[in-house]
Image: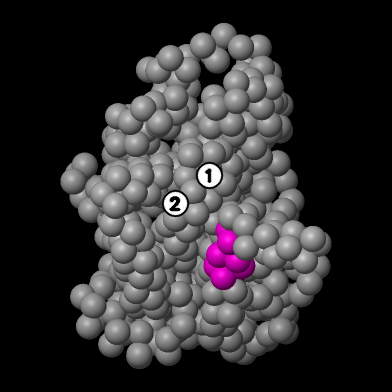
Amino acid sequence: MSRTLNRAALTSDLALLAYLSLAKLAVHLLTNINYGYFRDELYYIACGEHLAWGYADQPPLIALVARATRLFGDSLFALRLPAALAGALLVFVAGLLARELGGRRFALVTTALAVIIAPVYLYLHTILTMNAFEPLLWTLAAYLFVLVVKYDRPRLWLLFGLVAGVGLLNKHSMLTFGFSIVAGLLLTPARKYLFSRWLWLGGLTAGVIFLPNIIWEMRHEWATVEVLRNAAVNQNLPLSPFGFFAGQLQLMHPLTLPLWLGGLYFYLFTRTGRPYRALGFAYLILFALFVGLKGKIYYLAPAYPWLFAGGAVAWERAVAHLRRPVLRPVTVGLLLLGGALTAPLMLPVLPVESYRRYAAALGFEGVKTEKLRTGPLPQHFADMFGWEEMVATVADAYHRLPPEDQARCAIFARNYGEAGAIDFFGPRYGLPKSIAKHQNYWLWGPRDYTGECLLTVGERLKDVQKSYTQIEQVATFTHPYVMPYENDMGIFLCRQPKFPSLRELWPQVKCYSC
């Protein structure tokens, strides 16, 4: 009897979901140590050395996670393990959601495979980023919403609020998710829950969790609002609604299009999906919101697991109605084949030159989300190269200074990638901590430097000349794979400042997504 029970447990739907989740985890653990540290990872590590309730461009959770990973060393494996685990959990929760929507084994497998092969998730769960946790938190909240409606258990709104609160400490875009769910409720009979004290208590729970970050924002003149406003103007690639939709195809994989369109149909037009129609409206609201706010195409990525789940349930029922069981292995086979074909475009598995040939053969030029010009590699890979080499170049220039100059010379970086690299790799090259004008580095200030001696990294000569009289280019950093604006980068030694002190100049150099 126990052997039979064990066999049943090992072949159950939940076990199958666990196996698929572990497969997703294994993919990342086997590949995420390739290439190098990503630009944002170096910044998060720096933020982890300055723990606070907020940062100019993000809430506090990612810095805490980065700090925690360093308990296990500074390896890429340790740093990226939380993101890989979040990806595995996303597969499992998405499958659970499909099951609660009425899906059986085929629907669960289809949902899980769609999540696994989606290019955007392959990349986001490779590196440490806020965006690695966002899909999991949104999907978990959507799962709780389904449980509330299906079983009429309004007390689960408290747990929904807890997840939303954690989501807000991860990324402020959780606000858009909450807004879309409330708007979706208003448009459906599920609006009755808006009168439930449990929903309001859930909202209060989220608010209490989020409150320390709100207080931080108030004390720092709503820095994140300024960052987002500037980014929409200066950085984000403007897209039409059609261009935004085309971006979703690229991020989610063209083969999953029938699934997520089917998911919309499931929620909005089928009897089975009707109780959860708010999720369909939530997606449409989010799409319109991000297009209207000129958001990046990946901002919508966390919404797709619940569409995959609904679409998989609808497809499972269509296959049963058509009495064409052969469509099940065909569906699974197509998803696996299509995913394998595109995976090397997002996972760091190929040598660089092999990647370039492979991407060219597929006609893939990268996913563009910003106005920046790209080089031999798309930005998502280019920003993994050159950081330690850049720090070595800076160190060579720094150590050629007389000892008395080294003691008072600041290293001033243009952006948080350069500054984060100097702070991370610098100790092994004998460098002091850097200062920078970009994002939260500006808030950390000029330390105790006066500015009488300054090494600039990444600054343009014409900008340096505004602040210094004596300027000498002491090094040039070049690398074949970095972003073009990081290549052929001059490193200037600056003396004889035109300002009384660096601290007095500091308010003028602020760069919030400038």
Q: Which residues are magenta?
A: 15-25
As drawn, 153 above or below 374: above
Q: Element under label 1?
A: helix
Please rate how many residues cluster around mark 2, counting C-alpha atoms within 10 Å: few if below 14, some from 14 to 19, many from 20. Answer: many
Q: Name the residue tied to disc 2.
A: 107
Q: From the top left corner, tell me how far across and down residue 358 is, in percent.
A: 29, 84
As drawn, 150 above or below 424: above
Q: Disc number at residue 201?
A: none
| Magenta-colored stretch includes residue 21 | yes
As drawn, 392 above or below 375: below
Marks 1/2: CA distance?
8 Å
| Magenta-colored stretch includes residue 11 | no
Quick check: 247 left or right of 81?
left
Q: Name the residue tied to disc 1.
A: 99
Magenta span main SS: helix
Q: Element under label 2?
A: helix
Inspect this view and state whether residue 232 appears. no
Q: From the top left corner, tell me how far across and down residue 81 is, in percent.
A: 66, 67
User: Residue at left 46%, top 83%?
Assistant: 349
Q: Are marks 1 and 2 in contact (CB under 8 Å)?
A: yes
Q: From the top left corner, tell me how far across and down residue 1 is, in percent.
A: 79, 60
